[in-house]
């Protein structure tokens, strides 16, 4: 029994209903079958519905000679439909996976093009979702990976939506045939050295011959797993809330969590919470590399364990775990003289220094720890700086970055550490504003 044809325009309009108030809809237009049908459907709907402004974007990767003709084809299609087209040429970085590198370049262009309150529409369909599920299953993905491509997600300052994920490729082909649409065929789609093509042309025909509804049921499984991931995310937020306590060193701007609430959880909940937290900070480790978390968590109290990840490091200090990346992993360059202390001093790769109150007499210099520093404190006399930092529980990773104010050989102040940051009788204090991630730390 053949499956009845669905009303594609009505289905698409229903899927787009929550996004009717967006500033603009931009279609990721490759010129292939799927995106050609999506573009044609939207233009068809625009004739009878009040929709946001519609435009298209074509990303030219420059990876094969055949692709050089595609921007002109896309322009012709868009001109015929009265849709503005933006063509973006990208440089695909060499690497182990050409597919991934091209995707990264493409989505980088999409992020750049998508503004606030704008929607980028891509044309992946139900068959693509099934292929994604099987591909990731063969790579040993967890629940997040097996949930497939999300229907919608944040993209840059706007959002990405895949409104055709519940539509079969055969239904798109039928629509294209009915409306006599023309599209380009990517020759690389026939290259079976690419894993997805192998699955599409070698594996799925065998599966669907035995199980005709394989695509639909696998796509449904991805939906179930997506719902399971939502529940795991909610659990992670609950667990992270108990670990997101206030720290005396929040002013550093370094992401951190209290270790004790996490350590009380089961191992699976620890991994779930940390995965959720780390997703915004780094590429996640595979299951074979989570032993680094065990070592960090279980190290003795006086140890300074580090868990190195793809885009930074987790450190443990003061009963907390801290995420470090970018310049936090490097020693800051030499600072030197502060010629005019009335003007804020920009420290190379280390933020900004300012004075409050009456500036002490100079000449003044900014240095960093080398070891053996001594500071004179009222009522306490000479004290080793190391001991003073220990007393205040200063995390080890920040000690080499703390700006030290000197007058000749005399250590006058340690920036932003209460009781060490100035002179109360003379009414001045030294304030350090470390670099944030937005300023270039990561």
Image: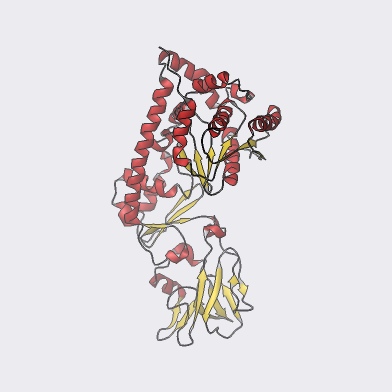
Q: Is residue 10 above or below residue 234?
A: above
Q: Nearer the viewer, residue 374 or 7?
A: 7
Q: Nearer the viewer, residue 73 or 236?
A: 73
Left or right: 395 in relation to 191: left
* Rendered location of residue 262, percent (x, y): 32, 52
**Residue in the image at 42% along x and 73% along y:** 387
* Rendered location of residue 295, percent (x, y): 38, 50
Q: Is residue 5 above or below residue 345?
A: above
**Residue in the image at 47% along x and 23% along y:** 168
Left or right: 272 in relation to 124: left
Q: Nearer the viewer, residue 3 or 371?
A: 3
Q: In which quadrant of the rendered image does the C terminus lie?
A: bottom right
The image quarter containing residue 315 is bottom left
Q: Is residue 240 above or below residue 96?
A: below
Query: Is there any visible trace of residue 64 in the rendered image?
Result: no
* Rendered location of residue 25, percent (x, y): 55, 40
The image quarter containing residue 249 is bottom left
**Residue in the image at 55% along x and 34% along y:** 46
The number of callouts visible is 0
Q: In which quadrant of the rendered image does the N terminus lie?
A: top left
* Rendered location of residue 348, percent (x, y): 60, 65
Q: Nearer the viewer, residue 207 or 117?
A: 117
Asked which colour scheme the image uses, the reply is secondary structure
Residue farthest toward the front in the current orientation of the protein: 48
């Amino acid at each position: 029994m053949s499956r009845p044809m669905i009303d594609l325009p009505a289905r698409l309009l229903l899927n787009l209903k929550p996004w009717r108030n967006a500033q603009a809809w931009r279609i990721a237009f490759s010129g292939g079958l799927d995106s050609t049908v999506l573009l044609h459907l939207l233009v068809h709907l625009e004739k009878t519905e009040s929709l946001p402004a519609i435009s298209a974007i074509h990303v030219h990767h420059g990876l094969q000679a055949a692709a050089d003709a595609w921007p002109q084809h896309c322009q012709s299609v868009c001109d015929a439909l009265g849709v503005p087209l933006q063509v973006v040429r990208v440089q695909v970085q060499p690497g182990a996976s050409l597919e991934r590198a091209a995707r990264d370049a493409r989505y980088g262009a999409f992020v750049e093009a998508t503004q606030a309150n704008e929607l980028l529409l891509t044309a992946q369909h139900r068959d693509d979702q099934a292929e994604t599920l099987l591909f990731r299953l063969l790579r040993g993905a967890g629940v997040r990976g097996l949930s497939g491509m999300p229907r919608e997600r944040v993209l840059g300052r706007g959002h990405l939506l895949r409104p055709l994920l519940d539509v079969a490729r055969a239904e798109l082909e039928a629509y294209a045939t009915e409306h006599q649409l023309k599209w380009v065929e990517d020759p690389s789609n026939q290259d079976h050295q690419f894993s997805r093509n192998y699955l599409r042309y070698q594996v799925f025909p065998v599966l669907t011959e035995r199980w005709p509804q394989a695509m639909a049921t696998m796509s449904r499984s991805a939906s179930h797993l997506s719902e399971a991931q939502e529940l795991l995310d909610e659990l992670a937020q609950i667990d992270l809330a108990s670990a997101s306590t206030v720290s005396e060193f929040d002013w550093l701007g370094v992401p951190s969590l209290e270790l004790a609430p996490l350590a009380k959880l089961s191992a699976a909940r620890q991994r779930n919470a940390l995965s959720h937290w780390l997703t915004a900070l780094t590429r996640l480790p595979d299951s074979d590399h989570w032993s680094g978390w065990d070592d960090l968590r279980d190290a003795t109290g006086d140890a300074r364990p580090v868990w190195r990840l793809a885009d930074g490091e987790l450190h443990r200090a003061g009963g907390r775990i801290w995420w470090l990346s970018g310049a936090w992993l490097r020693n800051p360059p030499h600072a030197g003289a502060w010629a005019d202390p009335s003007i804020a001093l920009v420290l190379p790769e280390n933020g900004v220094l300012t004075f409050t109150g009456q500036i002490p007499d100079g000449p003044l210099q900014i240095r960093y720890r080398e070891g053996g520093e001594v500071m004179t404190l009222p009522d306490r006399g000479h004290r080793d700086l190391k001991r003073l930092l220990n007393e205040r529980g200063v995390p080890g990773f920040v000690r080499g970055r703390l700006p030290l104010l000197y007058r000749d050989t005399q250590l006058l102040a340690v920036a932003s550490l209460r009781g060490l940051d100035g002179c109360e009788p003379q009414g001045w204090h030294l304030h350090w504003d470390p670099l944030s991630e937005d300023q270039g730390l990561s």
